[in-house]
Image (tube, helix red, strand yellow):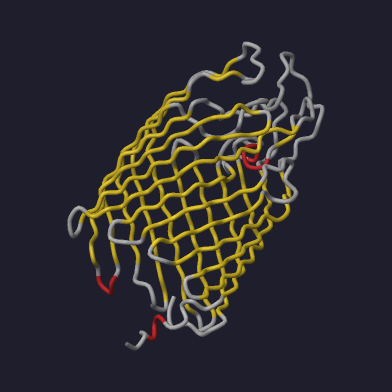
Amino acid sequence: ATLSSSLINLDSPQVTMAGMWRQREGDSGLSQLRIRHVPIFSGLMQQGYHLWGMQIGRLQLDSGSLPADALIGNVPLVPRSFDFTVDTDLDAGYEWHADYTYLGELEWHITIGDTAWLSPLDSGPLYSIGVTRQEQSRWSFTFQRENVRDSMLSYIGQRDPYSGVIWCGVTETGLDFTWDSPISPQWSVTTEINHTKLRAEHVPSNKATKIRAGLSQSISLRHSALLHAGPYLEHQEYDRNLSLFTFGQGGYFSPQNLSGIGLASSYSTADGHRHFIKAQFDVGYQKFEEEAAPYFPLAPDGRMYRPTEDTHTLIRLTVKSVVKLTPHWLIGGAASYLDAPSARDSSLGLFLTYTVKPRGGV
């Protein structure tokens, strides 16, 4: 059989230069976060069933100016000025990861990386090990350890302005399971389960469980494009509320109860053409509860944060696109927007890729 011209050299070695910008709204100096990941260099090489990749990128973070009365670190009973400077605009150096994937009936993958080199705290190695079955009924298991990127405190850690001690830098270690199975020619059921343990320096450990289940209808459109849409239910719970910024808190969203319902949809064009577009749009409703929490979880002094209970609409949008400029050059980008109880978060990424062999499509 003759290989379609659009599929020629899709396994070509390639190198990419990229940049990523992200903004998370919040309180200046605390939960606010701006990330600049520029430049990013990556390479990809495939030989038969074996796929290798490597990426390195420079990380810069900015959480805005820190108010003099901010509730951060070992806040004294009698207010006073800070004794140490807190870096809220930081060049964290370069972070990297390397990947290997075996592209068989069972797809195995492993990723190994590290925290940015100039981070205040060394959180240790980051990794992901998983297996995926790419059949009509698709499932995957992944065991991973990764940073929690909700704030500068949770991502890389910060200095306590009163004692000078550097604390936090949260890592999340646990298991992800996803299962997607057809129940008719057009409908499928999807289940996602995530159970993790969160650890950080001078912060109590925490556990989190997240479950999402949904139905999806597949609709074929013109030019082999696909639309998937259907309802979903979700639930999340953490053992502790460690969402604040005083010493011993973790600076990451950690509700004791979050329940949601919504509609998820996705659209994608066919592979192998001059351009490719993939978009996902979720809209829903979430209710969450955060329990009262001590200022200092490891050494309570009686001061407490009040419990929180609220409802919020959820809007999540992601768009990715790739265009073939010439047989050797691809250009593309990705954008996302999230409006949820956890945060209002947006990001933009751009990339330029050179393929060693001329490609017929993307």
Camera-side residue of 337 and 178? 178
Q: How many marks?
A: 0
Q: From the viewer's perspective, is 167 left or right of 186?
A: right
The image quadrant where one finds the C terminus is bottom left
Camera-side residue of 250 and 306? 250
Residue occupying the far bottom of the picture: 2
Q: Quadrant of residue 105?
A: bottom left
Q: Residue 111, position in %: x, y? A: 56, 56
Q: Residue, x 42% and y 74% (percent of image)?
A: 275
Residue occupying the far top of the picture: 302
325 up-or-down from 147: above or below: below
Q: Residue, x 39% and y 45% (percent of image)?
A: 315
70 up-or-down from 227: above or below: above
Residue occupying the far right of the picture: 83
Q: Residue 321, position in %: x, y? A: 45, 67
Q: Residue 222, position in %: x, y? A: 25, 72
Q: From the viewer's perspective, is 110 left or right of 190?
A: right
Q: From the viewer's perspective, is 336 left or right of 116?
A: left
Camera-side residue of 26 and 246? 246
Q: Residue, x 72% and y 22% (percent of image)?
A: 74
Residue occupying the far left of the picture: 184
Q: Quadrant of residue 187?
A: bottom left
The image quadrant where one finds the N terminus is bottom left
Q: Residue 128, position in %: x, y? A: 54, 51
Q: Residue, x 52% and y 26% (percent of image)?
A: 241
